[in-house]
Image: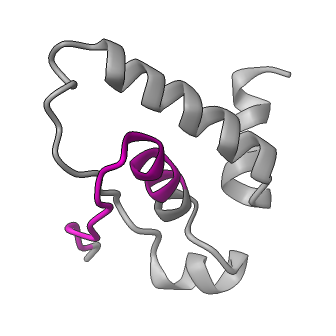
Amino acid sequence: ASVKTLLFAMKNKGHRNALAFVSEQMARHIRQDSFLSGVSLVTYAPRRPGEKQRYGFDQAQLLARKIAARLSLPCIPALLRK
């Protein structure tokens, strides 16, 4: 599957396998990158309220939580969408 297909499945379909794969790859990259290795939390840009209602979930939140769990870090909803 292409990256575009994978991201579409994750973003629009809530595909759990895609979320698991992407979160593992991102967590691995964070662990290996000396610049990112000192992060102390994970946050995300939330979906617009209408989109969250339409799809029933916030893929950025799900992804951030999975990454945070893999890195044993807190996931904080620190960003707002206007």
The residue shown at (80%, 59%) is 13
The residue shown at (55%, 25%) is 25
Residue extending furthest toward the front: 72
- Numbered label tally: 0
The residue shown at (71%, 49%) is 10
Q: Quadrant of the N terminus?
A: top right
**Residue 75, position as x, y percentages in the image:** 32, 61
Nearer to us in this view, 32 or 56: 32
Residue extending furthest toward the right: 1
**Residue 77, position as x, y percentages in the image:** 28, 71
38 vs 73, left or right, is: left
The residue shown at (71%, 29%) is 4
Q: How is the image coloured?
A: one colour
Q: Quadrant of residue 30?
A: top left
**Residue 36, position as x, y percentages in the image:** 21, 25
Q: Is residue 16 above or below residue 56?
A: above
Q: Quadrant of the C terminus?
A: bottom left
Is 78 magenta? The answer is yes
Q: Is residue 55 above or below residue 1?
A: below
Magenta-highlighted residues: 63-80
Q: Is residue 81 above or below residue 9?
A: below
**Residue 63, position as x, y percentages in the image:** 53, 52
Is 22 magenta? The answer is no
Q: Is residue 52 above or below residue 34?
A: below
